[in-house]
Amino acid sequence: MEIYDAGLFRLINRGPESWTRVMVWLSTAFDNRTILYVFVALVVCLIIIPRTRRAAIESLLAFPIANSFTDLFKHQLPEPRPFQVLGDAILRVGWSESMGTASAHSANMAAVAFVMTYRLRYGGVIWIILAALVGYSRVFTGAHFPHQVVLGWLCGGLVGYLTVSVSNLITDRRRRNQGLIDSEEPAESSLTTDNG
């Protein structure tokens, strides 16, 4: 498995140099305060719009939880990053002493993509594409092995799923308490779409 993972890493990591600028930007965009402020402004706009409010709020919750989840993996199951163990790895972003077990960047974007797709259906496609590109960029820039990106995506997807499930349970309970749902009627599945 490690041989295949290292081989796939080298294939992606040695991609066209003409992609470097875009891949580095995708890989480190949130390290730039201006980009972070633009992202926060976008989320605030999505919160203001009633149709996207719930998706935006849940995404804001899922994002840091996914990040913390990957930190837990990195602490409990430390695994090196490619540039820490492969002499031929091309590092296009800053050196890090932290472990690379699960890509936090990939997890964060996957959590947002799951929530946005679940709540907005086709409106989530752009977030899926962005999550895929961010994950790919983490390998291209030498920050993570492919399996670490996949683990990040899985962590983010799980966090996104749990976020919408808990949100749906809270909404069902609130409706029941307000008498909007008959208490004898079985509750909605925790993953039924509710854009409210």
Image: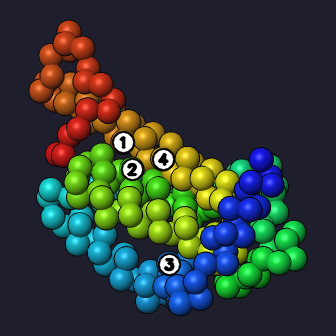
Q: Residue furthest top?
A: 184
Dots 2 and 3: beta carbons under 8 Å? no
Which numbered mark, 3 or 4, is in the foreground of this view?
A: 3
- Which numbered disc, 2 or 1, marks the residue that appears first in the sequence? 2
N-term-proximal mark, 3 vs 4 = 3
Cα distance in 3D space between marks 2 and 1: 9 Å
User: Which label is found at residue 164?
Assistant: 1
Q: Does label 3 or label 1 sit earlier along the sequence?
A: 3
Q: Circle 4 sits in a helix, a strand or a loop, which is it?
A: helix
Q: Which residue is mark 3?
A: 26
- Give the labeled residue for mark 4: 157
Neighbour tally class for label 2: few under 14, some 14-19, many 20 plus, Cα within 10 Å: many
- Left or right of residue 128, residue 44 in this image: left
Whether label 2 touches label 4, CB < 8 Å? yes
Report the side of 72 relative to 25 (left or right): right
136, 117: nearer the viewer: 136
